[in-house]
Structures are given as C-alpha cells and as structure tokens.
Image (tube, rainbow, N blue to C red):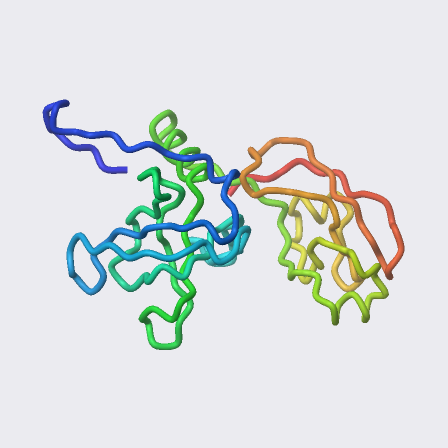
Amino acid sequence: MIKVDLPQERLIPITFADSNALITGQQVIAIGSPFGERWTMTAGIISALNRTISGFNAGFSIGGAIQTDAPINPGNSGGPLLNLNGEVIGVNAQIRSETRSNSGIGFAIPSNLVRRVTEDIISTGRVNYAYIGIRGTSVSLAIMESLNLPNNTRGVVVTDVLSGGAGGIGGLALGTGDTITNHWHSHHPFGRHHHAYQRRGGQRHGRADFILGRV
C-alpha cells in the first residue's frame, strides 16, 4: 500500500477482475520495469492456475497463484498482470529460473487475494492469514501407488505437522500417510471452523476438525 498526496483528478483508478473466473490459455499482459527499463509491456497467456509459490514469511506459501509465460524479469514484481480489457487479474510476484531472468515460467498473486489483503491493511493496518499448521505435497501418480490411493485422488499429502497447530490438534498426523482430500483455501479467514477429510493407508479414515490459526 502506498499513500500519495495528489489531487483526485490526477488519479485514474484501475479495475480489478475476478481472478476466480480466469481460464488457462487466456491472453494476458504484464507491465513493469524489468532490469530498470520503465514501463515495459510484455504479453503471453495464462499457462496454469492454482499454483503454490513461496510466501514472504519462511515456511509459508501462497496458494492460487497464476502461472504465465508472459516475460517477467527482476523489476516486474509488484506490477500488474492484466487481461485484454485492461483489468488487473494479478500482481506479478516471482519467476522460476536458474538464471534470474525469464524462462517462460512466471507467477502472479491473484487479484481476489490482492484485494482482500489491501482491504485488510486499510481497515486494520495488518494482514491476517489463516493456516492449518502443516506442510504438504501434491498427490502425484507415484504417491497414489505408494499409498494405495484411488487413481482420481486430488488433495495434499501431509509431510509435516506443526506441534500445537490447528491441524495437529484436529487429528492430522505425521508418518501415517494422511492425505487431505477436500477443498481448502488459504484465503479462508482465521478463526473459522473447518474440517479435512482424511485418507490413511489408502482408506477413508474420517475427518479432522479444527479452527484455522492466524499467522
């Protein structure tokens, strides 16, 4: 958030689109200052949705990120990712590269999350993130086979459980092959009651009930 002291007539607000309505293959435009080159515009498509990227705090992640092949380089971070109507669908955040320059895989934080964060900062002066208190990995084919999971399983395999965290208190356990198979968003507010359906040893185990913690 940046507070500026300018006459209202000099400020032209930009519209935020609903990032939940995005589709893979949609054309996008990224604007930023890569390597200090101001007002640079690049174009591409949405390569994938619902990616997970590293958060600003160690050990935490940001879910629901937009993956794009629009060239993003150092200096693009914080610039908008736009649809062809000129609406913000995300804020450019990170790239995946071994050379610190564009390799065709860039990520943007979705506009709906950006809007929620800015509203929190304006109203309370801080951002509250909800968390379960686990680390996990996606369910791959190899994991399905090793844990004897159905071949249409979608979810998260628990790889670590924070002692005293919401998930551990609710019954999620390390070393049991616990797999969370219901839908959950990190965008949900803290303090909310939630539950996770579990599969343990490939079999339906029940559910863990917990109250989302706050970061």
Q: Residue at x 33, y 28 (%)?
A: 122
Q: Nearer the viewer, residue 43 or 198?
A: 43
Residue at 25% of width from left, 30% of height from top? 13
Residue 46 image-quadrant placement: bottom left
Horizontal side of 184 relative to 206 (left or right) equals left
Viewer-proximal residue among 65 and 39: 39
Residue lying at 54% horizontally and 39% vertically, measured from the top left: 187
Q: Residue at x 35, y 52 (%)?
A: 92
Q: Say which quadrant the N terminus sits in.
A: top left
Q: Position of residue 152 (x, y in %)?
A: 78, 56
Residue lying at the far top of the rendered structure = 8
- Left or right for 140, reference 27: right
Q: Position of residue 41 (x, y in %)?
A: 24, 54
- Tell me which corner region of the image, top left, top right, bottom left or bottom right, holds residue 162: bottom right
Residue 121 image position (x, y, % from top left): 36, 32
Considering every residue shown, the one lying at the far bottom of the view is 99
Looking at the picture, does residue 136 appear above or below residue 2? below
13 left or right of 206?
left
Placement of 99 over or under 116, stated as above or below = below
Count numbered badges in the picture. 0
User: How far from the left and from the top, in percent, is residue 97?
Assistant: 39, 72
Which residue is more in the foreground, 196 or 181?
A: 181
Query: In terms of image quadrants, where is residue 37?
Result: bottom left
